Amino acid sequence: MMKKVLILCTGNSCRSIIAEALINAKLDGVSSDSSGVKASGRVNPNAQKLLEQKGIWKDEYHSKTIDKVLDNEYDLVVTVCDHANETCPMFPKVTKIIHVGFEDPDGKDFDAFLNTYEEIESVLLPKVKEALGL
């Protein structure tokens, strides 16, 4: 039975896209979507370039608002926004929610995106597995 995860942040252009791609590429039996409360409508070019370099970019990855995913059923919702600088969105449905915050690399150099990728891979993936009981 495939587990469904939603990665939620503010802009849905960097962190949540990277997390969605990593979960889909590296966690067996888990399928991920992402969205943002104020979705920017574009994937950050550095995020896309990084995922292409890692071989896990898919053309279906795009920035979308939360209303596009509200009707989906999720086993887990993960908020990845940086509490210090942003208000984390609430998911209106009753489901398991965890928070794993990452600094937004938007507007920074490519190395910042690489750091975010490595952090998400080493910190977020184990927490998602744990929360889903995998």
Image: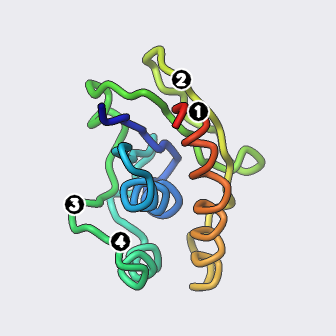
Residue under the image location 45 percent in, 19 percent down: 92
Residue 60, label in figure: 3
Task: Point out the tag, 3 or 2, that comes first from the N-terminus.
Answer: 3
What amino acid is labelled 4 in the image?
Answer: Ile
Find numbered disc 4 in the image and state the secondary structure of the residue it sits on.
Answer: loop
Mark 2 nearby-residue class (10 Å; few <14, some 14–19, many ≥20):
some
What amino acid is labelled 2 in the image?
Answer: Lys
Give the spatial CA distance, label 4 vs label 2.
Answer: 27 Å
| Vertical position of residue 9 compared to residue 121: above or below | above
Residue under the image location 31 percent in, 36 percent down: 2
Q: Which residue is mark 4?
A: 56
Give the spatial CA distance, label 4 vs label 3.
Answer: 12 Å
Residue 43, label in figure: none
Mark 3 or mark 2: which is in front? 2
Q: Which residue is mark 1?
A: 131
| Vertical position of residue 23 compared to residue 31: above or below | below
Mark 2 near mark 1, Cβ–Cβ under 8 Å? yes
Mark 1 nearby-residue class (10 Å; few <14, some 14–19, many ≥20):
some
Give the spatial CA distance, label 4 vs label 1.
Answer: 23 Å
Task: Point out the tag, 4 or 2, that comes first from the N-terminus.
Answer: 4
| Vertical position of residue 28 compared to residue 58: above or below | above
What amino acid is labelled 1 in the image?
Answer: Ala
Residue 96, label in figure: 2
Residue farthest along the right direction in this orientation: 84
